[in-house]
Image (cartoon, rainbow, N blue to C red):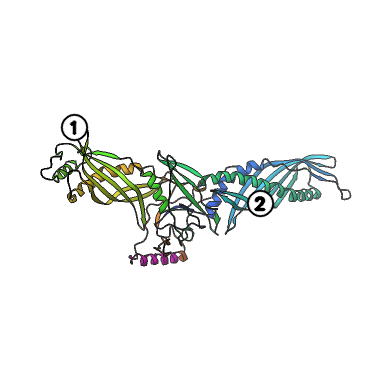
C-alpha cells in the first residue's frame, strides 16, 4: 500500500460520544481518499480483479442471417486474453454506503465463422462497472457488506478480424451481444471480488492481540460502519481481558463533540477514549510486588534513608532492630487511573511501601507501612503499531498507615522515599509498559507516521446532564470555516475551566507525515 497523507491519533479527555450512540473504546474516521487507496490495493494492486476476470466464460455469439443475403455469423471460444489499465474511483454516499466505479479494458478473442469462412476475431472493449456497497445485518461485532446495486456500461469497442475486413453486420452483432451479456457476467464477478475483499478488510476490525503474558485486547466493531460525505466512520470496542478470563470494564458517557468535523484533513484518525486507555493500563500495570534492599547498590540514597528511619525510633524501643538490614516491599494498590487534559497526560497510581527487617528467627518486624499516591507524567508516541508510553514521577503524596515500632511522624522521610521510587520503581513501571498499547491496523492502513493530540470534548455528566468541559484542537491545516468552529469550542473550554490564557491549547505530542496516496 502506498503511504497515505497523515495518520492521527486523538486522545479524548472526556469520553467522546460514539458515532451512532453505541459505547466504544475507539472511534475511527477514514477519509474517502484512504478508503479508495485501500480498495485499490485490495482489488487491483493485489491482482484480485484481474485474476477473477480470467475466469470469465462468455457465451457463443450466433446470428441466423435473417437479413436478405446476410451470412450466418457464429463466434465461439470467446475468452479473455488480458485486462488493461484497471482504475477505481470512489464516492461516499452519506448515510448509505459507498459507490465504487471500476473501469477496465478487456481484450477478448475467439473464432468467427462467417458463412463458410472461419478466422480469428479480436475484440477490445472498455467497461465501466458501478457498484453501490452498503453495510447491513450488524450483530455481535460482525457486519455484512453487500453489493446493493450494480450496473455496467460499455465504452469504446474495437473489433478486428485477423485475416479480412470487418463487416458492419459482424460489428453490430458483437456490440449488441456484449451489451446484453457483459453486465450479467461482470456484476456477479464483482460480488465475488467484494466477498473476498470483505473477508480480508473486515478481519482487520476483529482482532485479538496479546498483551504479553498478562492478557489480551479484542478489538471488534461496536456498531455498523457508516459514511459521511468525506469519511467512513467506525466505532470499535476494545475488550480488555486478563489471563484467566476476567474482563476489565471501561466506562463511556455520551458526548456532544463529533470527531469527524475537525479531522478531515487526515487520511485516518483514531480517537482513543480515556476510559478504554485506563482499562488497558489496569492490565499492563498489574505488577507483582517487588522487594528492594536498602543498600547503595539498589539506590544511591539508601544510607541516608536508613539513618533517617533509625532516627525516628522511639527512645527506649527494645524491639527496634537498629543493626538489621532494611528491606522495602512495594506493592500496587487498586487500579491506575489515566487523566487527560490539553497538553498533559497523567496516571494516578497508589502503592504500599512496607519497610521491614528480618529477625534471626525469620520473622519480620514492620517498621513502617506507608501509602504513596503517585502522579505520573506520561509521554506518548506511536511505534510498531502501538501506543508507546514513557512515565516519570510528577508528584507523590506519602501517608503513614501503621508502624510496629511506634513511628508516628514521617515528614522527614518523604524525600528519601521519593528518591527510592524514582531510582528503583519508576524503571520497573516503564519496563511493564515498554511494549505499549497495541492498536488495530484499521483496514490494513499502516501506522507509519502519526500526529498525537489530546483533546477536550463536551462530556455530559450522567447525573446532571450538564457539560463538564469542551475544547477542540484541529489537527493539520483545515480551512477557515473549521478554524473558526474550533476556536468557538476552545473559548467554551476556557470559560468552563476558569479562564485559561488564549495560548493554552492542546499540544502535539509527536508527529509524522506520509507521502501522498495513489
- Residue in front for this viewpoint, 452 or 142: 142
Q: Where's residue 366, x and y in %?
A: 21, 41
Q: Residue at x 66, y 45 (%)?
A: 189
Q: Which mark is residue 440?
A: none
Res. 451 visible in picture: no
**Residue at the farthest right position:** 68
Of the residues tagged 1 and 2, which is closer to the observer?
1
Q: Name the residue carrying label 1.
A: 360
Res. 47 visible in picture: yes
Q: Where's residue 288, x and y in %?
A: 33, 40
Q: Where's residue 198, x and y in %?
A: 58, 46
Q: Is residue 236 left or right of 344 when viewed as pictured?
A: right
Q: Earlier in the sequence, mark 1 or mark 2?
A: 2
Q: Where's residue 430, x and y in %?
A: 33, 44
**Residue at the farthest top position:** 361
Q: Secondary structure at mark 1?
A: loop
**Residue at the farthest left position:** 316
Q: Secondary structure at mark 2?
A: strand
Quadrant of residue 321 within the rendered picture:
top left
Q: How many marks?
A: 2
Discs 1, 2 touching: Cβ within 8 Å: no
Q: Residue at x 56, y 43 (%)?
A: 200
**Magenta stretch containing residue 277, yes or no?**
no
Q: Name the residue carrying label 2.
A: 129
Q: Is residue 438 left or right of 421 when viewed as pictured?
A: right
Dot 2, crowdedness within 10 Å: few (<14), some or many (≥20)?
Answer: some
Q: Is residue 106 left or right of 330 when viewed as pictured?
A: right
- Residue in front for this viewpoint, 393 or 161: 393
Residues rendered magenta in the picture? 483-506
Q: Is residue 151 left or right of 368 when viewed as pictured?
A: right
Relative height, residue 209 to residue 235 (above, below): above
- Residue in front for this viewpoint, 452 or 116: 452
Amino acid at each position: 500500500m502506498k503511504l497515505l497523507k497523515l495518520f492521527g491519533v486523538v486522545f479524548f479527555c472526556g469520553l467522546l460520544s460514539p458515532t451512532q450512540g453505541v459505547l466504544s473504546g475507539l472511534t475511527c474516521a477514514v477519509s474517502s481518499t484512504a478508503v479508495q487507496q485501500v480498495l485499490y490495493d485490495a482489488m487491483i494492486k493485489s491482482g484480485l480483479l484481474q485474476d477473477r476476470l480470467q475466469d470469465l466464460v462468455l457465451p457463443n455469439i450466433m446470428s441466423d442471417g435473417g437479413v436478405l443475403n446476410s451470412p450466418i455469423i457464429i463466434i465461439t471460444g470467446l475468452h479473455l486474453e488480458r485486462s488493461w489499465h484497471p482504475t477505481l474511483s470512489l464516492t461516499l454516499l452519506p448515510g448509505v454506503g459507498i459507490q465504487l466505479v471500476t473501469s477496465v479494458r478487456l481484450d477478448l478473442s475467439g473464432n468467427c465463422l462467417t458463412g463458410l469462412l472461419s478466422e480469428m476475431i479480436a475484440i477490445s472493449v472498455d467497461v465501466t462497472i458501478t457498484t453501490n456497497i452498503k453495510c447491513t445485518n450488524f450483530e455481535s461485532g460482525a457486519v455484512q457488506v453487500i453489493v446493493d446495486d450494480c450496473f455496467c456500461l460499455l465504452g469504446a469497442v474495437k473489433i478486428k478480424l485477423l485475416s479480412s475486413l470487418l463487416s458492419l453486420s459482424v460489428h453490430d452483432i458483437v456490440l449488441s451481444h456484449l451489451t446484453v451479456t457483459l453486465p450479467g457476467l461482470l456484476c456477479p464477478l464483482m460480488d465475488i471480488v467484494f466477498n473476498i475483499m470483505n473477508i480480508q478488510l473486515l478481519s482487520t476490525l476483529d482482532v485479538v492481540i496479546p498483551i504479553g503474558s498478562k492478557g489480551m485486547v479484542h478489538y471488534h466493531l461496536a456498531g455498523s460502519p457508516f459514511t459521511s460525505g468525506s469519511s467512513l466512520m467506525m466505532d470499535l470496542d476494545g475488550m480488555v481481558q486478563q489471563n484467566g478470563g476476567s474482563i476489565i470494564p471501561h466506562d463511556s458517557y455520551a458526548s456532544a463533540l463529533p470527531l469527524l468535523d475537525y479531522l478531515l484533513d487526515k487520511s485516518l484518525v483514531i480517537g482513543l477514549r480515556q476510559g478504554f486507555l485506563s482499562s488497558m493500563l489496569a492490565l499492563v500495570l498489574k505488577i507483582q510486588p517487588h522487594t528492594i534492599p536498602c543498600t547503595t547498590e539498589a539506590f544511591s540514597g539508601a544510607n541516608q534513608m536508613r539513618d533517617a528511619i533509625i532516627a525516628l525510633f522511639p527512645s527506649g524501643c527494645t524491639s527496634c532492630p537498629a543493626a538489621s538490614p532494611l528491606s522495602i516491599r512495594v506493592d500496587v494498590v487498586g487500579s491506575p487511573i489515566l487523566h487527560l487534559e490539553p497538553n498533559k497526560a497523567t496516571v494516578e497510581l497508589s502503592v504500599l511501601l512496607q519497610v521491614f527487617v528480618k529477625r534471626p528467627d525469620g520473622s519480620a518486624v514492620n517498621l513502617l507501612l506507608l501509602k504513596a499516591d503517585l502522579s505520573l507524567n506520561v509521554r506518548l508516541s506511536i511505534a510498531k503499531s502501538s501506543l508507546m508510553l514513557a512515565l516519570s514521577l510528577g508528584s507523590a503524596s506519602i501517608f503513614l498507615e501503621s508502624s510496629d515500632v511506634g513511628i508516628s511522624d514521617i515528614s522527614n522521610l518523604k524525600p528519601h522515599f521519593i528518591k527510592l521510587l524514582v531510582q528503583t520503581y519508576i524503571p520497573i513501571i516503564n519496563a511493564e509498559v515498554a511494549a505499549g498499547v497495541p492498536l488495530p491496523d484499521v483496514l490494513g492502513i499502516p501506522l507509519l507516521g502519526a500526529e498525537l493530540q489530546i483533546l477536550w470534548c463536551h462530556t455530559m455528566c450522567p447525573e446532571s446532564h450538564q457539560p463538564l468541559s469542551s475544547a477542540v484542537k484541529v489537527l493539520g491545516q483545515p480551512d477557515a470555516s473549521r478554524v473558526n468552529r474550533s476556536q468557538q469550542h476552545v473559548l467554551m473550554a476556557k470559560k468552563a475551566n476558569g479562564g485559561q490564557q488564549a495560548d493554552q491549547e492542546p499540544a502535539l505530542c509527536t508527529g509524522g507525515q506520509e507521502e501522498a496516496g495513489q
